[in-house]
Image: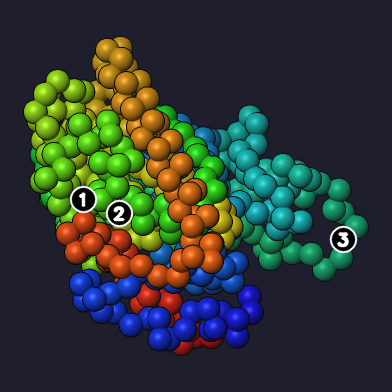
Amino acid sequence: MDKNQVKKIISPSELGIDPIAKAHTIPSQWYTSPQVFELEQQYLFKKNWQYVCHADQISAAGSSYCSRIAQNPVIVFKDSEDQIRCFYNVCKHRGGPLAIKKGTKTVLQCQYHGWTYLDDGSLRGVPDWNKVDLFDTKDFGLDPIPFELWHGLIFVKLNEASPSLNQLLGGIPEAIAPLSLSNMEFHSEQVYDIHCNWKVYVDNFLEGYHIPIVHPELAKLLDYRAYTTETAEWYSLQHSPFKKGENMYSSKGGQAFYYFVYPNIMLNILPGRLQVNSVIPVSADQCKVVFSYFYEDAASRTKSGLIQEDIDYSHQIQLEDIEICEAVQHGLASDAYHKGRFSVKREVGVYHFQNLLKKEYRDVLNQL
């Protein structure tokens, strides 16, 4: 990363925080610059909690789940004592990926040359190594990653410079009561590859301003006049009651809760359903979004067809979001755009997110 180049792109003059009625959006170059992308991977995503998977996805001893956090491979698995373990998914021989060794529940094996590790990360077996001098297996154990479990969701952090998980998510369970995330069962996962910067996707999620134009079917479901955005220290909430009428959600009563947890996690909570979206940066102009679906009483909902109806509906909304986000990425990269302004009524969530980014960028510039 060229530090001087970064300082030219992220100028201190762009980091001021004005009231929303006077504020400008962040500069377009922050969405298109490879240097800014690299800075975010190194400093932003390594210091903030990242969602990996649900405990249901590794419920059986010996089951595992692999992901990437700030470009780092990660593996989470359940050992024979029903304990969750989390490591960098990197063998200490030559960087190969790990998986649970066939026929075991507690041994990790490199899928490249067969080195094996116990569930505590210690190196156990090294094939064809008898002539290697000055080699101590204690020096080649796996690197553990701190993690925490929150209502069944597994979060990890690569360093200690982040708020506690309770500080990050405090208040959400109380706000959605009597709905309970702990009652949700994992159902399935869907992955989308999108040609836009991760912040474009986040910005889009954080406002309902585009719903009447981009999502005509969603506009029929939600009461747009009552659509409200609230902010906390590290997250924002958009919520709306359902319009009266026959649909798969309003019959249950309640409303839609759309939580954004900084920097890249969405919790979409509807009656009887949780959808977790994890936005994974890939490059300056590409991201991957993982949709994970959870339901109350998943068996009966599957039988009735409600789950498939919900997933199909969400997929259509996502296709609409992908189309507009990719178009916005082209617009941000054009000669015609630099910065915009905020709707005071409709873009409070975007304003909140971009101010958190500015604070983080300011801290990073002070370290460079």
Which x, y percent locates residue 253? 9, 30
Q: Which residue is mark 1?
A: 238
Please name the residue shown 24% across and 76% down the image: 22
Q: Earlier in the sequence, mark 2 or mark 1?
A: 2
Residue 127 versus residue 111: which sits nearer the camera? 111
Residue 55 versus residue 51: which sits nearer the camera? 51
Please name the residue shown 49% across and 48% down the image: 326
Q: Which residue is mark 3?
A: 132
Marks 2 and 1 in Cβ contact (< 8 Å): yes
- The amino acid pointed to by label 2 is Leu
- Say how the picture is coloured: rainbow
- Can residue 46 be spotted in the picture? no
From this viewpoint, which residue is outermost toward the right?
131
Q: Quadrant of the N terminus?
A: bottom right
Horizontally, residue 101 falls left or right of residue 14, namely right
- The amino acid pointed to by label 1 is Gln
Residue 355: name its quadrant.
bottom left
Please name the residue shown 74% across and 64% down the image: 136
Q: Residues within 10 Å of mark 3 (few under 14, many from 20)?
A: few
> Which secondary structure, mark 3?
loop
Q: Which residue is mark 2?
A: 206
Q: Residues within 10 Å of mark 2 (few under 14, many from 20)?
A: many
Horizontally, residue 131 falls left or right of residue 169, namely right
Residue 88 versus residue 229: which sits nearer the camera? 229
Residue 228 versus residue 298: which sits nearer the camera? 228
Mark-to-mark CA distance, 1 and 3? 59 Å
- The amino acid pointed to by label 3 is Val
> Which secondary structure, mark 1?
strand
Q: Residues within 10 Å of mark 1 (few under 14, many from 20)?
A: many
Please name the residue shown 64% across and 79% down the image: 2
> Which secondary structure, mark 2?
loop
Number of disc labels: 3
